[in-house]
Amino acid sequence: MIVERITAIQNTIQRAQKRSALAASEIVLVAACKSQPIEVLKEAIAAGVTHFGENRVQEGIGHWREIKVLYSHVILHLIGHLQRNKAAEAVALFDVIETLDSVKLIETLAQEMRKQERFLPCFIQVNTGEEPQKAGVLPKDIEVLVQACRTEGIPLVGLMCVPPADMPPAPHFSLLRKLAERYGLTQLSMGMSEDFETAIRLGATHIRIGRALFGERS
Ligand SMILES: *Cc1c(COP(=O)(O)O)cnc(C)c1O
């Protein structure tokens, strides 16, 4: 049951907050809902989940286009790679974009935000493990994107990362926090089902939880 899983997650969040001086006082739980049917999303909403994360614009539209007006308090995060040709749809549907990864994308999004008058809070996705196949920018390239956001008037609020699957995540979370501090950014989207306790102890403000909330993906 989703209600029970949420309680377990909340207990873990509180434990992590008690154990660390770095832990944020308010943690946003983003339910990573890839491939979940709409009934399950409704169950999560009924259980009190308000933030949802989608990996793809198209799947997000499939999930939410019809029901978002019914749940106007729901806040939708894009947590997967965004192609520039989907920028208009993304700005129309989402409330937060966590995956800025190029200056060109920032320019296209800024244009759409002005056109639609929807200035969405954004995160830059950082490839902290410098993995060639992984989305996000290298740590050394963050500065250029931060500048581009400031020039274009995009509300940049933080950094996001997905650490390498086969390595301890803590050093990646610490690195993300240091990088955010360097650029004066206050929000950190880091930590998933397996490692969100560690992420919170190292300063996460947003955790993105899939399996611990919805069960294993088939
Ligand atoms: C799927 C996904 C998550 C959630 O992962 P779980 O291990 O199921 O908690 C978080 N962030 C991103 C970007 C994802 O794609």
Image (tube, grey):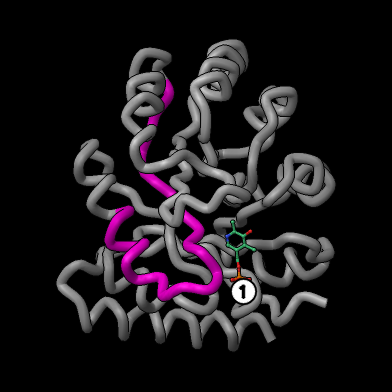
Image: magenta residue range: 154-176
- 165 shown above or below 88: below
Q: Nearer the viewer, residue 175 or 140?
A: 140
Around disc 1, counting alpha carbons within 10 Å, would you say few (fewer than 14), some (14 to 19), or many (20 or more)? some
Measuring from the top left, give residue 172's x and y in whole percent.
Answer: 36, 62
Q: Position of residue 97 (x, y in %)?
A: 54, 39
Q: Assess whether residue 96 is covered by the magenta stretch.
A: no
Residue 133 or 175: which is nearer the viewer? 133
Which x, y percent locates residue 214? 69, 76
Q: Residue at x 72, y 81 (%)?
A: 216
Q: Residue at x 69, y 31 (%)?
A: 83
Helix, strand or loop at label 1? It is loop
Q: Circle 1 sits on which residue?
A: 47
Quadrant, the C terminus: bottom right
In this picture, is 103 found above or below 95?
Answer: above
* Foreground pick, 14 / 170: 170
What residue is shown at x 39% (from left), y 17% (from top)? 153
Q: Which quadrant of the picture is home to ligand 1?
A: bottom right
